[in-house]
Image: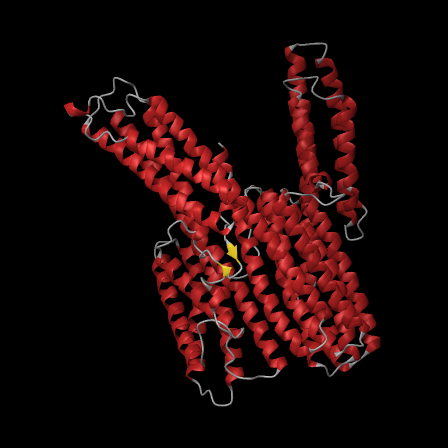
Amino acid sequence: MAASACPAGVGAVRGSSPSGFAFDSGLEIKTRSVEQTLLPLVSQITTLVNHKDNTKKSDKTLQAIQRVGQAVNLAVGRFVKVGEAIANENWDLKEEINIACIEAKQAGETIAALTDVSSLNHAESQDQITIFTDKSGVVKAARLLLSSVTKVLLLADRVVIKQIITSRNKVLATMERLEKVNSFQEFVHIFSQFGNEMVEFAHLTGDRQNDLKDEKKKAKMAAARAVLEKCTMMLLTASKTCLRHPNCESAHKNKEGVFDRMKVALDKVVEIVTDCKANGETDISSISIFTGIKEFKMNIEALRENPYFQSKENLSAMLEVILERTEDFTDSAYTSHERRERILELSTQARLELQRFTSVWMQTQSKKTKSIAEELELTILKISHSLNELKKELHSTALQLAADLLKYHADHVVLKALKLTGVEGNLEALAEYACKLSEQKEQLVETCRLLRHVSGTEPLEITCIHAEETFQVTGQQIISAAETLTLHPSSKIAKENLDVFCEAWESQISDMSTLLREISDVFEGRRGEKYGYLSLPKPTKNNANLKSLKPDKPDAEDQAKVVKLGLKLGLLTSDADCEIDKWADQENDIVKHGRNMSRMAYSLYLFTRGEGPLKTSQDLIYHLEVFATEGLKLTSSVQAFSKQLKDDDKLMLLLEINKLIPLCHQLQTITKSSLQNKVLLKVDQCITKARSMMALLVRLLSLCYNLLEKLQMENNRWVSVTNKDTAVDCKS
């Protein structure tokens, strides 16, 4: 049983050494696939062990038994090789892992020997010890195999945790250097190192997030990684602004806010992987109205079987806690009078229904008549109905308020005004619009709190908390960035910095729209797909040996701009990898072309850092041409797949394809334009186009995966119905 719980750690194994990443990027896939191969085969052996002694031993049966034994032994061999590789990279665990690997190997060989029954029907093999003569031997070997595999997986999990903590410490150390840097040239150099370390950290945590079985932890990890992803961009521009305007107090305040938030997020990741709660952390389920109602109803319904399960006082206290939390809605200045009155009315109704229920419940403890039991059932239904009506009203109130708010602020008038005010250097107007943004921030923060109450699941509650914190922090940072620009209206860096923070705000507004859809899906019984946050790209094999490249000598500001563009592309690369990893069929043409595009985009990312296989401008041009061609191949494969779909799904997919095709052609056109004296401009344009293509690739991979799953479910349903009809026909 333990083995099934262990893959979480192994999926993320990526051994490290002083020279860099020693394991290739497919190690976690190999480990997981071997483990997934082992367990079903052991299950088959268990079935064979339970065979009846008088079962006829046909040649076909004997061959099947032998094939299973050989397959187990081969899978164990592959698993042991991976385990030994992990051991060689982690000396502190080497002895323990090697012992477990030896046990697994012995178990595999024993199973192979006991299932070597192909010649059992021959006279000379009558004295051979096999599965038919030594059942206990097979059982012991299977148990030893599961035990040793579990040990390796648990030890590998410790390796993953150690890697994440080590990587986080490296990031923190480099952040400290970035905080203290005084020259722009030195900053660019250190930030380049920081970017590489963030790539490593984000990839390790991304693997861990994908392998987590606990949805609550997975949501927390996604939120922390989202903070780090967005703050990486903010750190770049905020630090540049501080270096350009070292005596500006608002610039330093802006930068410090970014560093502080990143440090908190880094600590949060370590808390999640080590399963250690921070002091004073409370369980968020205790503050959710919907969770409270769910628990209350469970307690009420349990009284059907056991009338003494709860006390009257406990039930009354539970309901009061729930109704007390509804004050977040009724006390809100943004809740309409009608909705406030309706919530209060339903709260009163719930109290009355509980009183009626309590009265009947007390009678059931002394009388066991059928009429009393029926009356108890009726009161349970009534109180459940009243609470369901309250849930509906709260859900409707929160979502309507959020939708109205998002619609009202969709054009981002305040952000545009702050940008214009900054360029004009108008301090008086800055104060006015900063006040308006603060009001908007408070509205959004309060709305997130209301949404958290009606989110319906713990992962969505965590997403609401993340949104609330993001609006709270980003709102203040936009104001400090706007103040810096207003004080230095001609500063390009200050303007760029404000743009980055405004983009983060707009991005969170967009994420909130998705959140509303997900909350509605859960409430209506449709479990909408939870879109994962972007993660950073995977390092390529042997990346420690890649030589630095300086194709030309741009000034520090231009170099920083190219690094920023590349980093954005890099972020999308790993998001594509995460989508690709979801596909069961890794040989699917869509997956193949998507993987090729992701790898090529990662090479472009390395080029922007002066690293990687692309050494010259001509290398870059050729690479981009192939990248554009691969994009067109992807569209062809997606078009072929769309022919299997229904009209609505097909149209949705073709709309996305029609966005990608023009981008591919535009990139091809840019690569054919003249290079003379415009190298940086051309790189800028190419990376921008590649980034847009990768964003579409991520959406296409996700959409195709969901549509394929839907298609397979429909096909399975049709086959099931057909089989039933056939069975009925046969019987008749």
In front: 139, or 688? 139
Seen at 67% across and 10% down, the residue is 368
Q: Is residue 686 left or right of residue 335?
A: left
91 relative to 54, above or below? below
Question: Residue 97 at what x, y percent from top left?
Answer: 48, 42
Q: Residue furthest bottom?
A: 676
Above or below residue 722? Residue 30 is below
Image quarter in which the C terminus is found: top left
Q: Residue at x 76, y 46 (%)?
A: 329
Based on the displayed image, in which of its 4 quarters is residue 241 positioned? bottom right
Q: Quadrant of residue 264?
A: bottom right
Give the image location of residue 160, x and y in percent: 55, 49
Say whether residue 543 is visible: yes
Q: Residue at x 61, y 44 (%)?
A: 216
Residue 347 visible in the current orientation: no
Q: Say which of 83 and 226 sits in front.
A: 83
